[in-house]
Amino acid sequence: MNKKIFIIAFIISLIVAFFLFDLQQYFSLDYIKEQQTAFQQYYADNTVLTLLIFFVSYVVITALSLPGAAIMTILAGTLFGLVTGTIMVSFASTLGATFAFLTTRYLLQDTMESRYPEKLKSVNEGIQKEGAFYLFAMRLVPIFPFFLVNIVMGLTKLPVLTFALVSQIGMLSGTIAYVFAGTQLAKIDSLSGIISPGLIFAFVILGLFPLAARKVMDKLRANKVYANYEKPEKYDNNLIVIGAGAGGLVSSYIAAAVKAKVTLIEKHKMGGDCLNTGCVPSKAIIRTAKLLSEAQHAPRYGIEKMKAEVDFKSVMNRVHDVIRKIEPHDSVERYTDLGVNVIQGEAKILDPFRVEVNGEVLTTRNIIVATGAKPFVPAIPGLDKVDYLTSDSLWEIDELPQRFIVLGGGPIGSELTQAFARLGSQVTLIEREERILIREDEDVSALVLESFNEDKVDVLTQHEAVEVIQRDGQDILVCKHNDNTVEVPFDKLLVAIGRKANVTGFGLEELGVEINPNGTITANQFLETNYPNIHVVGDVTGPYQFTHTASHMAWFASVNALFGFAKRFKVDYRVIPWATFTDPEVSRVGLNEQEAKEQGIPYEVTSYDIDDLDRAIADSADLGFVKVLTQPGKDTILGATIVGKDSSSMIAEFVLAMKYKLGLNKILGTIHIYPTMSEANKYVAGDWKRKNAPEKLLVWVEKFHTWRRG
């Protein structure tokens, strides 16, 4: 810090001296014209020394962002001529700019990253991919202030060598124009005379060059990718979508809405995993389990005796009834009426422009892959010897498992653990990490664990499943815990430790579509694969495996596929909420404490305990909290976590606030209906306000009121 203060003081002293001693008088066009003969005579007598003095002076002027660089460029033309002057200015300006760039980076980058981490993160991501192009454009067009470009780029992570090389090349045309003007000094009356409207227009055209060059490069890359494929003369479709889950349905809906010819292909069931084996059936069984839990705790509500018996077959029938009731929303008939050509069959991508289904080859300009994911099943010895369950097959059982193991303490495993425990299973949850819901903060995991204990769930953390064995007709899961072996007998075992993207069996391997190390399809920020006309959405590419993010991505993929030749849109992952539907529910958007610490992002935390909320008390649901992370000293929301009843609905207010950059003051100033659970959001904002009250000002306000009382 002392070094930085010294450098800042030194720079300020040089700048002050420049103006204090009125050095700017020597950097005017009139002065150069007056001294032209003397300058040229000195240069003739002291050539090397003049070149050295000029070079150093130019570097200092540009490094300190002082006025005068344009005049010195003209002087270079006057003294040295076009060739030598251009060489001198080109290297001196690049060196000075690089010094300014490095000084800004050293003095300000850390401070700016700590204050504006998210903004700079997105900027740096763009700079990493296209920074050289944008810098080139700014250097070509003289309407961008020279010194400002140096400072702005210094705040990014653009490599120094890239900055220097691109700057030198980009500034060359402008340098030549000014140096040439210096050779014609007698004809110049003002700086504005150097750059005419016509020349400005020429520079603007040059500035568009890197953007056009990028388009050309994209075209060349595409031509290389498509070199071995014959493009159809005419296309049957503007878009073919493979997979009718959330991402595929929304993609095809958008395409049909803008009157594109779109074909949607689904090999199994419309609605995908969410409708048939995921979100819908799990929430249906959770609701039944919740009702049963309330009945078992009827004394809380003043009802002494309430008997509830579980007919598990009827419970599962209700689950399937719920699915059937929602099915029309995602049906073939509905999407056909919307203008989508729906084909039920197995798709095979033959090449980037052809898809085969049911023996028919369809041509298309674009393809969207929305094939989703399936439960990941680990290679545990002996697991294949038992009739294990996954979130896909769970819904086919009609008998309640008595001894039920759930392998995996993430969101899916936790939700189903609690539901089956409440339905009457003796559930053992096996988690190899140190706690359940490992992505959430420790206080969140602890609160959910407390609820699990009340539901008599046996939670075994830091237990790793290593083998399934049979002994005396009994199925047993063998786990490792520290150095000990733990055996857990079971009747049914549910594997819920994650999902694996569906990337095989429909032509991606043969086509050479790139796959990430984690097994998902590689896509750029426009959701394009290495084939620019093949886009991806949803679980098959990630990074978030949620129904609502698949729908969100679908807009970007479909619009880019259909209109990307004119304008492409980068997928926006800035504000992604999610919920785990345990009781209490866990909902989050943005950062939590453990993520902020891992990323080194400074934050303040404000919490409000729901046990103080009137509506929660009235509903005997006074368990949980609202926790908000904000920038230190500001009401800017970095993230929010809500644990409690209906938190998945309550979190929407924070999602909206973060999306549109509304702070806690705005939430505090918003009327919330009394009595509702959503009042907790306002109360946490109020707690933040009290913590950040202007104490010194309030002391004087108190004195003022005392004075007013007389």
Image (cartoon, rainbow, N blue to C red):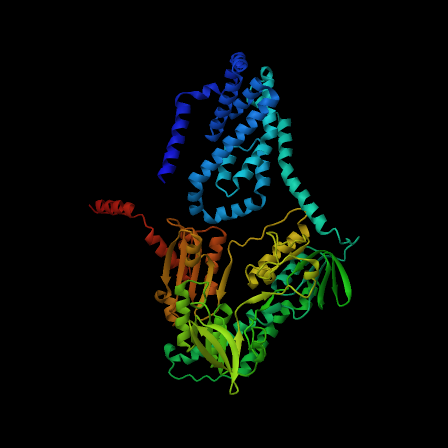
Q: Quadrant of residue 320?
A: bottom right
The percent coordinates of residue 214 (x first, y second) are 65, 42
The percent coordinates of residue 308 (x first, y second) are 46, 83
Q: Residue furthest left?
A: 710
The percent coordinates of residue 439 (x first, y second) are 46, 63
- Residue lying at 60% horizontally and 72% vertically, measured from the top left: 276
- The quadrant of the image that shows the N terminus is top left
- The quadrant of the image that shows the C terminus is top left
The answer to whether 98 appears left or right of 18 in the picture is right
Between 308 and 500, the residue placed more toward the observer is 500
Q: Is residue 140 above or below residue 483?
A: above
Between 72 and 613, the residue placed more toward the observer is 72
Q: Residue furthest front?
A: 483
Q: Count the marks: how many?
A: 0
Is residue 339 shown to the viewer in this render? no
Q: Quadrant of residue 316?
A: bottom right
Q: Residue furthest right?
A: 233
The answer to whether 339 appears left or right of 45 in the picture is right
Between 406 and 488, the residue placed more toward the observer is 488
- Residue lying at 58% horizontally and 72% vertically, measured from the top left: 277
Q: Is residue 478 above or below residue 702?
A: below
Q: Is residue 52 above or below residue 654?
A: above
The percent coordinates of residue 222 (x first, y second) are 70, 49
- Residue lying at 52% horizontally and 21% vertically, measured from the top left: 51
